[in-house]
Image (cartoon, helix red, strand yellow):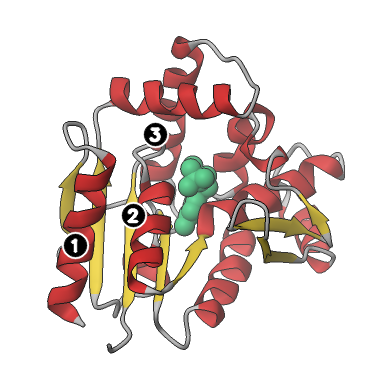
Amino acid sequence: MGKIVIAIDGYSGCGKSSTAKAVAKELGYTYIDSGAMYRAATLHFLNNYLTATNPKDIQKGLKDLEISFQLNPDTGQQDTYLNGLNVEQEIRSMRVSERVSDFAKVKEIREELVAQQQRLGKEKGVVMDGRDIGSVVFPDAELKVFMTADLDTRAFRRQKELFERGEIVDLEDIKANLGERDRIDSSRKESPLLKVEDAVEVDTSNLSFAEQVAQIVGLAKQRI
Ligand code: C5P
């Protein structure tokens, strides 16, 4: 089977990561969570007491930022590492969710992470999800998907996910966070979230998980 690049973009919390992961598994591809990279970078800056996105401080902080992924043998999933430490749980917390879109707006951070993402996808055979994968990271991707779902569905799914990780969060707070991230991500100057012309839109509001995975695997197979 040939190898292609699959770019999955879309709003916050519409199931991009879990879907992309399952699509990658089915095709024997590598899954790369670009959002985890923005989250890890945000955690790095917050841990270094950087709360404002001053470009000079950001440049300094980028010098000792190292993000990598390692397979967790217990879960069979790739965990995110920040400067050698496993931060997979911490980057999903509300503390990081509340600030990630502010840091993801910064040009210097985006340039650094986009370059890393392009290196990770050089050999093809990857499924990468994010906000600018089809538009900026891999504009030549053979398959571009734009995933959507209504806000209530997204908030409910995210609440369940946080609960399973031991964090109890009010549904209205999650809705506010998802809505605010969508607003910042779509209106920012640097590579805003948008549906590129050649992307296939997949609305998952009324699809089961298996259905959304099958739909994307089907689209991929037409292109391999
Ligand atoms: O995908 P996830 O929701 O974990 O991403 C967290 C945040 O990282 C997004 O809300 C967005 O601000 C940023 N992001 C981005 N570009 C990407 C992936 C994520 O700006 N390619």
* Residue at mark 2: C-beta within 8 A of ligand 1: yes
Front disc: 3 or 2: 2
Q: Are marks 2 and 1 in contact (CB under 8 Å)?
A: yes
Pointer 2: what residue?
Answer: 9
Q: Residue at x 33, y 61 (%)?
A: 23
Label 3 vs label 2: CA separation? Answer: 15 Å
Q: Is residue 101 above or below residue 164?
A: below
| Residue closest to the far front | 74
Gap between marks 1 and 3, in whole Å?
20 Å
Q: Is residue 195 in sight in this rendering?
A: no
The image position of residue 210, as x and y in percent, is 25, 46
Which of the two residues, 103 or 70, is positioned nearer the viewer here? 70
User: Image point 40% across, 84% down: which residue?
Assistant: 124
Q: Which mark is residue 199?
A: 1
Q: Quadrant of the N terminus?
A: bottom left
The amino acid type, in three-letter code, at marker 1 is Ala
Amino acid on which disc 3 is placed: Arg
Work out whether mark 2 precedes mark 1 in sequence or the reverse, and give the earlier one. 2
**Does dot 3 land on a helix, a strand or a loop?**
helix
Residue 183's disc is 3
Quarter where residue 46 is shown: top right
Q: Is residue 94 visible?
A: yes
Please tell me which residue lies in front, 16 or 59.
16
Q: Position of residue 173 (x, y in %)?
A: 50, 14
Q: How many marks?
A: 3
